[in-house]
Every structure is written in C-alpha cells, then in structure tokens.
Amino acid sequence: MRKLVVIPTYNERENVAAMVSRVMSLDGGFDMLVVDDASPDGTASIVRELQKEYPKRLFLVERCGKLGLGTAYIAGFKWALGHGYDYVFEMDCDFSHNPDDLLRMSAALDGDADVVVGSRYVSGVNVVNWPLSRLLMSYFASKYVHFVTRMPVNDATAGFVGYRRSVLETIDLDRVRMVGYGFQIEMKYTAWKLGFRIRELSIIFIDRVVGTSKMSSGIFGEAFFGVLKLPFRRIRPRRG
C-alpha cells in the first residue's frame, strides 16, 4: 500500500524540518506532501532544500496565498489520488499530533476501517497544555456536532485522520464547502453518510510548543453554523 501524509503549512519554519525527519524515519514507507500557502517565513524554501535528501518521498505544493485549511487538504487529496496513493493521512505540522501514531492508524486501515480518526475524546480527555477555555470549546463542539448530526464520532473536529483511497474517490471533493476547521466535521459526516466505516483511535494531543496557532473566531463561527446545515444537505457520491 502506498501511503501519503498531507501536511498544510503556513509559517511553520520552526517545525517543518523536524516533522519531515520524523515522518521519513517511520517504518511503513510513508511519503509526505507539504501544501504551503505562501508562508512569508520561508517554510517552502526549507521543504525544497529537504527534497534534495528525499527526492522520491517528499513533495511540495505551493499556493498563491492563505486560502484556508480545508482547501489545502482538498488540494492534497486530489494530488494523492492523481499520484496513485492507497492511504492518505492528514495531520498538523506542529507536533500536536504524534507522527508515531501513523503506524497505528495505518494498521486500522489495513483492518476494517475506511476512515480512522486520531481521537482526543474516545477514552476520556487526552489533551495536554491547552488552556481550559479552548479545551472546553473543543470538547463541547464535538458534543454539539453529535447532537445536531447524530454522527457516532467522539472527536468530530479532529485533524489527525486517515482515509482509504476509495473514500476520497467517492466523496465529491469539489462540493465540500467549509474551508476552516469545519472542514474536518464535513469530511467525516460525508464519509459516514456515504456508508463508510469510521474508527476512532485514542491519541494524546499536545499543544504546539513553537509557532503560532491558526485558530480564530471566524473559523469557529463557520463550523458552528455550517454544522446546522449538514443534516439538510443531500449527500451524493462523486460521479465518474
């Protein structure tokens, strides 16, 4: 199975080299695609230099500006499908997601899962170094998503996710509407409504040590109101 890790970046020069090194060192043959939104701090330049060391495993898509997390992942997913990958993973660049967990997530896709979610809330609350206000917002956001949609996922906003190729081929990626963190909810909901099997694996989420969080009130608002619309949408598989 060919495996690709898609990582969107914006001003991650302090993390990206270490993340590339960790992913490249894992057993299991994970390739990596960085989707950079014209980071002014030179993130893309660091990746280009590292490509000399990993010319067949490290790839870069450079976009013209900060276009949103969801659109970065969509660009990465389309790239993965076009380049023949079987498993596609998404994760953050700031080490809040432990790259070692990719091994467990890949094993879940080898088993009965179509979508595997690295979950902070499937066995208690496994979050380190978040302020209480952000933890409560995240935790109750997932409770809110479950209440509105009835989707059986404990961590609907999780950004550490693995997909089988068949899931990304079936979802009409051009019709995914939310571009911020609501994108994570919309993707899981769409996969669930299309009948794919979602499995959650417990992870420990550690807040970033260096760099700046990209969370904003606008991102939260998009997710809050976007979720209300999801049960009224007609979910259809992609044609052709």
Image (spheres, rainbow, N blue to C red):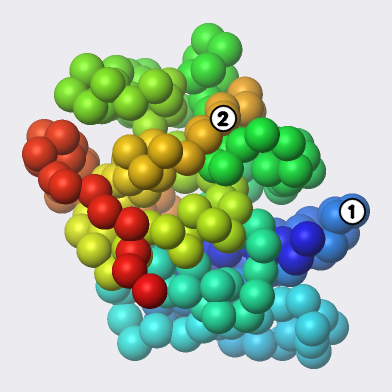
Q: Is residue 193 above or below residue 25?
A: above
Task: Give the residue drawn at x 66%, y 87%.
Answer: 48
Determine the image quadrant of residue 15.
bottom right
Q: Is residue 230 above or below residue 239?
A: above
Determine the image quadrant of residue 227.
top left
Task: Give the residue drawn at x 72%, y 62%.
Answer: 3
Q: Is residue 149 above or below residue 187?
A: above
Task: Give the residue drawn at x 24%, y 63%.
Answer: 175
Q: Residue farthest to the front?
A: 240
Mark in the foreground, 2 or 1: 2
Which of the numbered marks, if any, corresponds to residue 110?
A: none
Residue 215 position, x and y percent, is 31, 47
Q: On the image, numbered disc 2 is attached to which residue?
A: 199
- For residue 208, say whether it is visible: no
Q: Nearer the viewer, residue 152 or 184?
A: 152
From the image, which quarter does the N terminus lie in? bottom right
From the image, which quarter does the C terminus lie in? bottom left
Residue 196 position, x and y percent, is 47, 40
* Local secondary structure at mark 2: strand
Task: Give the residue drawn at x 62%, y 27%.
Answer: 201
